[in-house]
Image: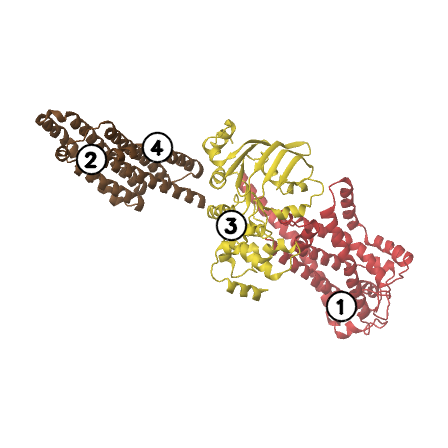
Amino acid sequence: MANAQYQRNLLNESGAEMLSLCTSQLEKAKDAFLNHDCDLAEEVVLNEVRVNALDLRIEKSCEKFLALYNPVAIDLRFIMAIRKINFDLERIADHAYSISKYVIEVDEKIPPHLFEALQFQTMYDTIVKMLEKITEAYENKDVKVARKVFKKDKILDRINAESFSVLEAEIKKDNNIISEALLLFSVIKKMERVGDLIKNIAEEIIFYIDAEVLKHKKKK
Amino acid sequence: MNSLQRNRIYDQIFKFWGIGCTLFGLVLLAVFIGDILIDGIMRIDWDFITDLPSRKAEKAGIYTALMGSIWILILTTFIAFPVGVAAGVYLEEYGGKNKFSALLEINISNLAGVPSIIYGLLGLEVFVRIMGLGASVLAGSLTLSLLILPIIIVATREAIKAVPKSIKDASYALGASKWQTIWNQVLPASSGGILTGVILALSRAVGETAPLIVVGALAYVPFAPESPMDEFSVLPIQIFNWISRPQHGFIENAAAAIIILLLITFVMNGIAVYFRNKWQKKLK
Amino acid sequence: MAKEIKIIMKKISTQVPLDKIIDPSLKKKAKIEVKDVKVWYENFNAIKGIDMNIKPNTVTAFIGPSGCGKSTFLRLFNRMNDYVEGFKMEGKIKISGNNIYKKNINVEELRKEIGMVFQKPNPFPKSIFDNISYGLKIQGITDKKLIEERVIDCLKQVALWDEVKDDLKKSAMALSGGQQQRLCIARTLAVQPSIILMDEPTSALDPISTAKIEELIFKLKEKYTIVIVTHNMQQASRISDYTAFFYLGELIEYDKTKTIFTNPEKQQTENYITGRFG
């Protein structure tokens, strides 16, 4: 089974490559947004091509693997999982892309007190931690680490839920910041969605390793 | 009664019929051997084997006949073995599947059934008279070789046919020529079967009487052959000669000689069976 | 002989990497070109005009239903069909540029360049050592040292060395089916061909032996060009680079395996590999 194993390992590496690529895209986008760094934002926009190319390559590899090697058990779950993980990662990269586009198109720096009010830094740190965790879980095939992501996501949900009223209050204080506030609002929504996508990826990793389906179930 | 019971009964009937037929042959053989042993075993001693024939029964021995038989056996082997095996190999490996080959095959099988005395007549005319060999051991061996040649050819062909085609395919696929394949694979693999056939053919030759009488083997020979051109006698002829004498002593001699002849035949057949078993095991 | 083998075994007591043993100049570039080839057995037209080019150092699989001519076609390359009654062929087959059906071709030389492994393992009823050295013996090679080294080398290439190194004089018939087939492959490798033909090499073997041989084929690809007939489509998809689909004596499609199994051009091909017809 040398050939199949070899191809399987290649696919595994492609998955890791996609993980690291999308992680770096997101981090750059958040940094660009936080510091209103247009150059960094440009980088993210240009890199989107690479993300799309890698996405297509992984899709094709999965198709080829299924056609040629008839995988079963853990190999089959791996292929099924990696396609979904790939899809989710691509959407995370898409969010990074649109956040970067905001930075470039909207030339207004967001006042720091708004970031503080909305606990933007906390969201940022949480997402960074979550990405670290699933990267670790993917590389080490560690289910326990993957599960840690679910709790962290609750932080993001909470911040997101509070964001509406917080922003409402801030706008009432100062009408001039409406456009920045709206921009920040939509970015926070995006980050919440990124958190959900990372959660999906964790579910897929648990499915692939443990054959446990966590979709539509209450997670602890 | 239903068909299941009927079948069982037929089964049993056939079984007992088979046992009966087998026993019939075995019992007859046992009776024959027993009778001979009773008549002749006392007579066998070293003198019997080394004495020359004589008109007095007590002094008569089988020495010359035994030596003659052994000479005939060895010479026939040297002539018939290579010729027969080579012919068998040629016909099986090189012969085409045309009408001529089919004709050849039929004729060789026919030759195996020709009465042995006909071979004697042929030998007399060709070897003794035309080739001028006289009534010698050589002429007798050549005649017997002709007789057993078809048997050896058929046995060789059967043994070669039994070698799986896959062995030959493998040899050809490695770049061996036809001859290399035959010499290195086919012959070694069929050697057991060929040997079995040759030994059985030879053990028949040892017992042949009629053709040798025609060729001119004598009944009274006071010396053992010392060269292929010498005159000779063989055990079966000696036995035949003694049986036609009236004295009772010669009957005993004949029985004893028969025992010796049987011993030779049994030993040769035993060797043939040994080789056949070894051969079958190797091919598995 | 036994003592000499023991001495050599002592020398090579640790597992020496394959690359150190195999002469790199063995890597030959043998390509096969087939032009408009037709085959008849008496009046039966078995192959109806096929063109094909096989690249060196690839594994090509021939697939198709029973009786479609794939074995016949395979045997054209080493002229094993010559022994079949009524065989007639038209067209050109060039191996490394030489037409192998020319009048003055030395068939024995051809078969040293092109080895064949058969469906049912067919070791000679001789010892393991004699089986592998046979190919060298018939070439007239008598250098004992060379023969022993070649035998050991080939046994290592097919991953049989560890299993039989204790007694090379043992009869080959005492080995298991999978071991016998690997022995047959070693026997073929001993004459250092550039092309290896395999006619359903694993169809008589159990799954584990099959897996071992597939792994071996994958390794051999580096040094040899391999053409394998198989009735097992999954095997074709697992191990081959190119696949040719035959049906009723015609070549329906010949393409990269990847393409054949994800998006074949001809509907017939797709019907066959999806199992929609036999």
Do the residues at pointers 3 and 2 share their chain?
Answer: no
Q: Earlier in the sequence, mark 2 or mark 4?
A: 2
**Position of residue B202 in the picture relative to residue C165 (left or right):** right
Do the CB atoms of the residues marked 1 and 3 lie less than 8 Å apart? no
Q: Which residue is mark 1?
A: B256
SS state under label 2: helix
Closest to the camera, between mark 1 and mark 2, is: 2
* Callout 4 amino acid: Val
Separation of residues labelled 1 and 4 (CA atoms): 108 Å
Cα separation between marks 1 and 2: 124 Å
User: Which residue does the numbered mark 3 point to in the structure image?
Assistant: C178
The answer to whether A82 appears left or right of C36 in the picture is left
Residue at which label 2 appears:
A34
Mark 1 element type: helix
The residue marked by circle 3 belongs to what chain? C
State which chain is coloured brown: A
Of the residues tagged 1 and 3, which is closer to the observer?
A: 3
Chain in red (letter): B
Chain the render paints yellow:
C
